[in-house]
Amino acid sequence: MNPSLEIGNTIITQDNIFSVLTEKQMIAPLAKEIILDRAIEGIECTQEEKEKMEMQFFQQMQMNPKDEDKLKIWLEKNYLTKQQLEKRILRPLKIDKYKEQNWGDQLQSYYLKRKSQLDRVVYSLIRTQNPGEAQELYFRIIEGEKEFAELARQHSKGVEAESGGLIGPVELNVPHPQIAQKLMTSEPGQVLPPIRIAEWIVILRLEKYIPAQLDQNLRRRLLDELFNTWLNETLQKEVKFNFEIPSLI
């Protein structure tokens, strides 16, 4: 008897499973899981780590691991064996260990490479499409006639008007590249003359420059970036279709 899965009126068999996976866009997620399983196969966890992960899992699920009947019902509802659950509980820890083993020693150099984009800024902005208005507003600010925030509320044409032109803190890869470049070479409090960026004429003032620091949160984020780059490259290299994908035309 060929295995099949019935979901309501839908029957998934060996004959149609590939077309179902393709239609539901599940090929890539499945391939990633298989690649990861292979990658972490040799990663070991201590007994203490296993106990800690199991305790966290059962606390999160609000389950008592010693309640065998309740655990059995949960496993059946989730189509898992006890051995599969044990592997699933340890999987996040093994992936973290794999990241550290493979990219931990590259983190400092990667951080330095990315730092200029990770530094954050708080800045004020007024934008208009009228060059004459931009010049007038700029001179009113530098001559102290009006506060930057007041003019931003009255004249800026973007959502920043609601906050008196104040934006941030944001990483330097968030603003338009021309704005980021100007802010990187400015001093706090300096009002920059109007510059054209696409259809806008923009007046800028750097409020605060916040250099990035390689703390635990940033370290984890950069490890994730390196890991995801590897995973996506491996996915592109290793996934091969050996069946005909149905035409969408």
Image: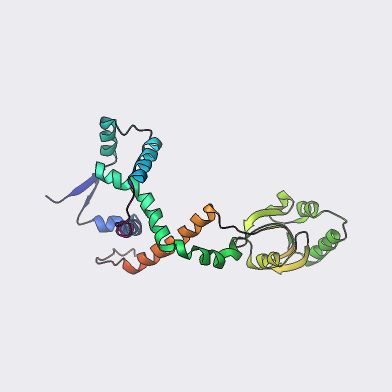
Is 194 rendered above or below residue 79?
below
Rendered image coloring scheme: rainbow
Is 84 rendered above or below residue 61?
below
The residue range painted magenta reads 34-46
Give the total of numbered labels. Answer: 0
Using the rendered view, name the quadrant where residue 144 is placed.
Answer: bottom right
Is 79 rendered above or below residue 39?
above
Residue at image point 88% right, 60% down: 143
As drawn, the residue found furthest toward the left would be: 1
Q: Nearer the viewer, residue 157 or 177?
A: 177
210 left or right of 112 in image:
right
Using the rendered view, name the quadrant where residue 80 is placed.
Answer: top left
Find residue 46 and report its horizontal and vertical position in percent. Answer: 34, 48
Question: Which quadrant: the C terminus?
Answer: bottom left
Find residue 179 and report its horizontal and vertical position in percent. Answer: 68, 65
143 left or right of 189 in image:
right
Using the rendered view, name the quadrant where residue 129 is placed.
Answer: bottom right
Find residue 110 and report its horizontal and vertical position in percent. Answer: 51, 66
Whether residue 198 is visible to the viewer of this picture, yes or no, is: no
121 left or right of 191 in image:
left
Asked if residue 35 is among those painted magenta in the image, a careful observer would answer yes
Whether residue 233 is visible to the viewer of this picture, yes or no, is: yes
Residue at image point 50% right, 59% down: 222
Asked if residue 51 is among those painted magenta in the image, a careful observer would answer no
181 left or right of 44 in image:
right
Residue at image point 58% right, 64% down: 115
Q: Nearer the viewer, residue 245 or 231?
A: 231
Find residue 218 and report its horizontal and vertical position in percent. Answer: 53, 56
